[in-house]
Image: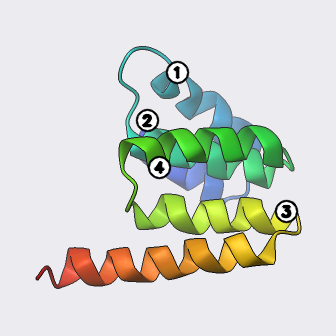
């Protein structure tokens, strides 16, 4: 389902993407990846508030998930919060460095 969601996002089919991934975001232990994809789909559908909630849930699970941080930056920009967006982008870069070249 995650691959299907990614394909729908790439095709800019945000409704299909959110419908596909939403069941994976419910329940006791949703993954940070599923929540991030759901947030991206909601952002694409111009639902910044619910997208931010999904992305915050993803970051609560994995605070350094680069995809979630970058999507959260997009959600901040949708709310005209450039400072928070830049902080999220910086966090994504730091996380990528740590994950690619762990110390």
Q: Which residue is mark 3?
A: 78
Quarter of the N terminus within the rendering: top left
What secondary structure is marked by label 3?
Answer: helix
Left or right of 62, for residue 78: right
In the image, 8 versus 85, the foreground residue is 85
Q: Which residue is mark 2?
A: 1
Give the quarter of the image for residue 74.
Answer: bottom right
Of circles 3 and 1, which is in front?
3
What secondary structure is marked by label 4?
Answer: helix
Name the residue at 69% across, 47% down. Answer: 52
Name the residue at 38% across, 41% down. Answer: 61
Left or right of 16, for residue 58: left
Measuring from the top left, give residue 35's x and y in whole percent: 51, 40
Quarter of the C terminus within the rendering: bottom left
Q: Are marks 4 and 3 in contact (CB under 8 Å)?
A: no
Going from the N terminus, do you reach mark 2 or mark 1 first?
A: 2
Give the quarter of the image for residue 19.
Answer: top right
Q: CA distance from mark 4 to mark 3?
A: 18 Å
Q: Which residue is mark 4?
A: 59
Q: CA distance from mark 1 to mark 4?
A: 19 Å
The numbered dot on residue 23 is 1
């Amino acid at each position: 389902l995650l691959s299907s969601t990614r394909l729908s996002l790439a095709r800019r089919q945000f409704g299909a993407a959110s419908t596909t991934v939403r069941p994976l975001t419910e329940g006791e232990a949703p993954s940070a990846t599923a929540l991030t994809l759901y947030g991206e789909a909601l952002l694409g559908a111009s639902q910044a508030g619910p997208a931010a909630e999904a992305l915050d849930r993803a970051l609560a699970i994995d605070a350094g998930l680069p995809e979630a941080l970058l999507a959260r930056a997009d959600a901040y920009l949708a709310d005209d919060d450039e400072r928070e967006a830049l902080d999220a982008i910086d966090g994504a870069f730091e996380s990528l460095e740590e994950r690619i070249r762990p110390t």
